[in-house]
Image: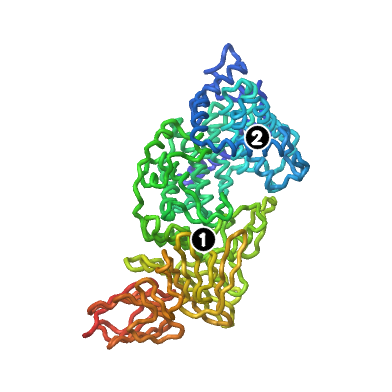
Amino acid sequence: MKNSIQLFLLGLLLLSQNIFSQEIPATTIISNENLANYLKVEVKDKITNEGSIAEAHLAQYFRETFSERYFYDWKNFEQRFQLYQETYPKVRQDHTERALDHMAKYNGDTPWKLPFNYLNGESVNAYALRHLARQHKMVDVAFYYNYQNKTPEYLNYFKNQLKSLNAALVRDDYENIEGGNGVYEVFRSGYRILNWLQIHNMFLGEKEYSDSDQLLTIATLLQHGANLYENNPEFTPGNHQTRGMSALAMLSILLRDFKDTDAWYERSMALLEKHLEKEIKDDGFQFERTVHYHMSDIDNYFYVYQLAKNSHLKVNDFWEEKLKSLFTTLTKIAYPDKSAPVLSDDTDNPWAEKNNISGALTLGYLLFNSPEMGYFANSFVKSKMYWYLSEEQLKMLKKIETVKPTTKSLSFPITGYYIMREGWNNEDKMMIISNGLDDKKPDHQHGDILGVQAMANGKVILPNYQVRYSLKDLELFKNSMTKNVALVDDELQGKQYTSNKGGSGFGKFRELPKPKMIVWNTSEDLDVFVGSHDGFENIGVDYSRQVIYVKDDFWIVKDNFKSNNKHTYKQVWQGHYSLEKSPNLIRSTFDNAEGLDIYQLITTDEVASSGQRGKGWSVVSKKDQTNFSFITALYPYKGYSNRIEEGRENPDLKDWKLNASIWKITGEQSASLTKEYAQMFFSVKQLQLNEINIEFSDVSDVFLKLNDDKLMIQSLSDEIIHISIDGISENRKHTIEPGNKMEFTIIK
């Protein structure tokens, strides 16, 4: 009986949620005369004057609420704008160029449905329509109005473009969601709300922005909010809904005097919390695995968190913890020069080899007052974010507390990023390994499974490149030829590339390798990473990659291929290389004689160089092999005398001697590195030294330390190794998991 009652009550709750009907219309604009009818009863009673609310009275009321609730008080705009010009003197040209570009392309009364033409007669494409719908450059027009001594035509241009969209809505003459370029699609509508709110607040003190104009903008924003609420009843993964729900939450806070806005707030905050739960992994990384979308999510949550704090609205602890983790993650993945690697679809600056994260971490510092975030922060924020800070936060920028991070090598095991780090001095080494794939939305993933990027001596020595969706070579820069990966024959990792149905240029791979994590182990001597993927199983090749960081000297990358048939196996290395002792030594050199030597410990066949867009890469190949392993030293150097000596047959790698071990080695295509009592062996079957005899059941990679009567063995292999040892006090036979260590006592 009790269970039946509970089920009945649950059913009533679900029914009540489903039958809630908005009063604010989603497909029409409320007239100014009727706007007061949609106020909450208590608000209407509060501002009613003798039974009615005049237009001027209602507009004045909302000017006051915006003064209290928006990111800054519009009454202080003139002072803010003056400080803005002093702080960002160069941004005037950017605003001007973008504003003039927008107004030269579109009338104020513009169409909102393809096909139509720019004012110069050229066709507007899908990519351009999407940006028109976001109204980014309308913000520039608003700034241009202020730069041009408040010439009315520029303010009127905004009013006319807003009215043109409302007219298109009434005529049902706008791009819809089904076409892929929907003007009211959640992402574009969300961005438009953000931008129009900023413009509205900028104009609230302007004579040309009449009471009627102000209320029309509010009515338009209400229609947008109702549309977002109606079309987002459930969680949908991805940054598009996050952007839209961020905007809906902002509207529900700023316009909370209206009916329905409590439901808007409840739904938007619940869906945003669901995005935080599902899309910010427990290791702190945004699920799309890119710095660009990671920082974009920071902005989405920041706007809401900041407005909620301004209005003293409760934001739960889960929200705050997840938001903070987004900032903390950026500090963990940063290069020693405070930038960040390029990870998949980073799009701010095409072909750039780093990401600027200082702006995001400046926001983190202002929200959480963290000196470690302050280490990356600027004494200013990006010009765009200036308008979303309080007066108190602007004052904080004048004296930032900083503490240098202490984190070294670490992993993001859920997202699949692994970082090998020397330290935080500008010349220190750092490498990041990518071995992850989001199972729900891999749209922004590149063909870089098991790819590496690295920095040393202040230079990105193994780069990846930012992309731009509208560029015709997007597919090239998303796929494996522009990554530091291993390949087989002419196979690339990304397969079945397809552009989106809207035709904006964005494209994704329908098929990508599935990564497998085998081992991640850090110690005082080595960081050891081993992983594999199934990207070449379609042609009968098993593949794995081992990356070993020899602290704090260089890296060894071992690429393993196994097949029953012969193939050409390849390594792709990004950069501009000279062929010092081709194909086994290639070299890149930067401006202060720092560089990277890529040295093959096992002989290869050839190296071929190529490039595009000013970027270059070299492909090292081994032909006609069934089983083969590249054993490659990635050797950063600074100064001519510190390079690998290309004239020597077995050159030293720092203090490590190549193929000069006192141990007797058995194994085909094996190699060794020796430093005092430490030894690394690759592709060995048997090792002998005096009375010590180590036999491996299969070809193996190991790290040994022999000191007095102690022998330490660490597996560097991609599979479990079985060993039989003579000359020790313990049992002869042992099994060692990848990355694990065992210690034995030598019989003397």
Above or below, comparing residue 539 to residue 458 in the picture = below
Q: Residue at x 37, y 71 (%)?
A: 654
Of residue 30 and residue 91, the one placed in the foreground of this image is 91
The answer to whether residue 440 is seen in the rendering is no
Element on which disc 1 rests: loop
Residue type pointed to by label 2: Ala
Q: Report the quarter where the C terminus lies.
A: bottom left
Residue 392 location, x and y as percent?
Answer: 41, 32
Q: Give the Cα separation between the discs numbered 2 and 1.
A: 47 Å
Question: How many other residues sit within 10 Å of disc 2, few (<14), some (14-19) or many (≥20)?
Answer: some
Give the camera-side residue of 283 and 9. 283
Residue 57 lies, with reference to residue 344, above or below; the image says above
Residue shown at the point (38%, 67%) measured from the top left = 553
Of the image marks 2 and 1, the number of the one nearer the N terminus: 2
Which numbered disc covers residue 178? none
- The residue indicated by pointer 2 is 26
State which quadrant residue 176 falls in. Answer: top right
Residue carrying label 1: 463
Q: Nearer the viewer, residue 661 or 507?
A: 661
Q: Looking at the picture, tell me which residue is in the foreground, 26 or 604.
A: 604
Of all residues, the one furthest to the left in this rendering is 748
Q: Residues within 10 Å of mark 1 (few under 14, many from 20)?
A: many
Tell me residue 555's x, y (percent). 42, 68
In screen coordinates, is 15 left or right of 111?
left
Tag 2, which secondary structure? Answer: loop
Q: Residue at x 64, y 53 (%)?
A: 506
Amino acid type assigned to the residue bearing label 1 in the image: Pro
Is 180 situated left or right of 206 in this image?
A: right
Q: Residue 70 location in percent, x, y?
A: 51, 30
Q: Residue at x 23, y 78 (%)?
A: 708
Q: Kindly report which numbered mark, 2 or 1, lies closer to the viewer in this rendering.
A: 1
